[in-house]
Image (cartoon, helix red, strand yellow):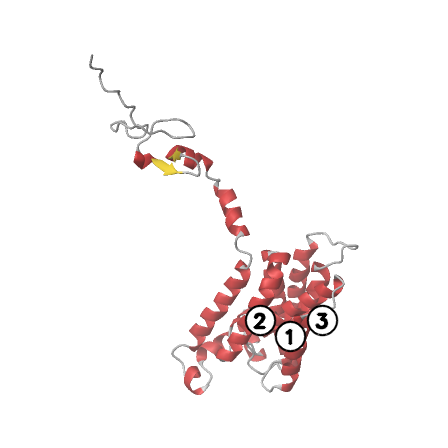
């Protein structure tokens, strides 16, 4: 006696396709196009979609996998501004100044015209490959050490607070010179890290940070053309932020203080700069 061939079920998503396979999770029949290989068996598209984390969770996972995002963005902005301010100018060839650098640099005379944006933009221009390369190298090293512990927002706030403090320091020390560079902000990060180590019982002079800071201070006062006020102002601003961000365990600070402190330091630096004009 001849038995009729078995009738295969139809794919749930493609009713015109008979299939002998099914999802090993929900058991629904599915064709090969609708199954995805899993660790055990194959799952249908619906099960895969249902098990996928929601948008907020995926964003949190992505965020956790980017421990130096703020550092990398700041470095990218500096590099792009360096290319913009120097491409097509005489700077690469003869070392001469160009209009793009002057338009973003800081000097007291420009502030008389209300160009206060220069307090920030001056921190993103650089006068040569060595200048931008050294600052970005130090920024990367400091970011790898500090951003993960401080958090992206507080790290960025400290960076810009130190930048503004460096601008104020440059105006105090040499108001007529055209000033530019991320050195003030970088010195501020070193100052914050130095203070943080001291507050936590670590001697910074026994670490690479202490040697780096001392070496850069020596270069600051011994090499001509370096903004001493910008470096020391940024260092002071960052160190002041560090007093509130890295409190010792026996004297914890409220979390909001870590955000408010760099904002207040940046505002104070702006007021100092405003009072000099």
Which of the two residues, 224 or 60, is positioned nearer the viewer here? 60
In the rendered image, residue 234, in percent from the top left (x then y), is placed at 64, 72
* First of labels 3, 1 by sequence position: 3
Residue denoted by label 2: 138
Q: Earlier in the sequence, mark 3 or mark 2?
A: 2
The CA distance from mark 3 to mark 1 is 11 Å
Residue 204 image-quadrant placement: bottom right
Quadrant of the rendering where the C terminus is positioned: bottom right
Can the viewer see residue 115?
no
Question: 65 or 44: nearer the eye?
Answer: 44
Q: Determine crowd level at label 2: few under 14, some 14-19, many 20+ residues with C-alpha closer than 10 A.
A: some
Secondary structure state at the residue bearing disc 2: helix
In the displayed orientation, state which residue is furthest to the right.
Answer: 250
Residue 17 screen position, x and y as percent: 25, 29
Look at the picture and state if 221 lies above or below 14.
below
Mark in the foreground, 3 or 1: 3
Q: Give the percent coordinates (x, y) of residue 202.
A: 74, 65
Q: CA distance from mark 2 to mark 1?
A: 9 Å
Tag 3 secondary structure: helix
Relative to residue 136, is residue 40 depicted above or below?
A: above
Q: Are marks 3 and 1 in contact (CB under 8 Å)?
A: no
Which of marks 1 and 2 precedes in the sequence? Answer: 2
Q: Quadrant of the N terminus?
A: top left
Tell me if residue 115 comes above or below residue 61 in the rendering.
Answer: below
Q: CA distance from mark 3 to mark 2?
A: 18 Å
Which disc number belongs to residue 206?
3
**Residue to which mark 1 is pinned:** 212
Q: Residue at x 30, y 36 (%)?
A: 33
* 128 on left or right of 191: left
**Pointer 2 and pointer 1: residues touching (CB < 8 Å)?**
yes
Q: Say which quarter of the image contains residue 218.
A: bottom right
Query: Residue 147: horizontal and vertical position, in percent?
Result: 60, 60
């Amino acid at each position: 006696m001849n038995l009729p061939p078995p009738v295969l079920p139809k794919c749930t998503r493609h009713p015109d396709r008979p299939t002998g396979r099914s999802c090993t999770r929900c058991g629904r029949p599915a064709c090969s196009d609708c199954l995805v290989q899993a660790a055990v068996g194959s799952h249908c598209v619906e099960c895969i979609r249902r098990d996928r984390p929601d948008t907020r969770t995926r964003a949190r996972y992505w965020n956790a996998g980017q421990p130096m995002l703020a550092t990398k963005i700041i470095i990218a902005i500096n590099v792009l501004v360096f290319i913009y301010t120097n491409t097509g100018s005489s700077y690469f060839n003869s070392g001469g100044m160009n209009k793009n650098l002057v338009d973003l640099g800081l000097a007291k005379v420009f502030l008389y015209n209300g160009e206060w944006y220069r307090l920030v933009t001056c921190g993103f221009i650089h006068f040569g490959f060595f200048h931008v390369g050294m600052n970005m190298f130090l920024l990367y090293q400091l970011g790898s050490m500090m951003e993960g512990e401080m958090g992206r927002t507080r790290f960025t706030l400290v960076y810009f607070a130190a930048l503004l403090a460096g601008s104020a320091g440059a105006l105090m020390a040499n108001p007529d010179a055209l000033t530019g560079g991320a050195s003030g902000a970088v010195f501020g990060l070193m100052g914050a890290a130095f203070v943080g180590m001291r507050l936590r019982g670590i001697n910074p002079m026994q670490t690479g940070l202490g040697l780096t800071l001392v070496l850069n201070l020596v270069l600051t006062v011994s090499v001509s053309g370096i903004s001493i006020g910008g470096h020391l102002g940024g260092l002071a601003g960052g160190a002041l932020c560090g007093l509130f961000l890295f409190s010792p365990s026996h004297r914890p600070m409220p979390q909001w203080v870590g955000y408010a402190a760099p904002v207040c330091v940046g505002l104070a630096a702006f007021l100092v700069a405003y009072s000099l004009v």
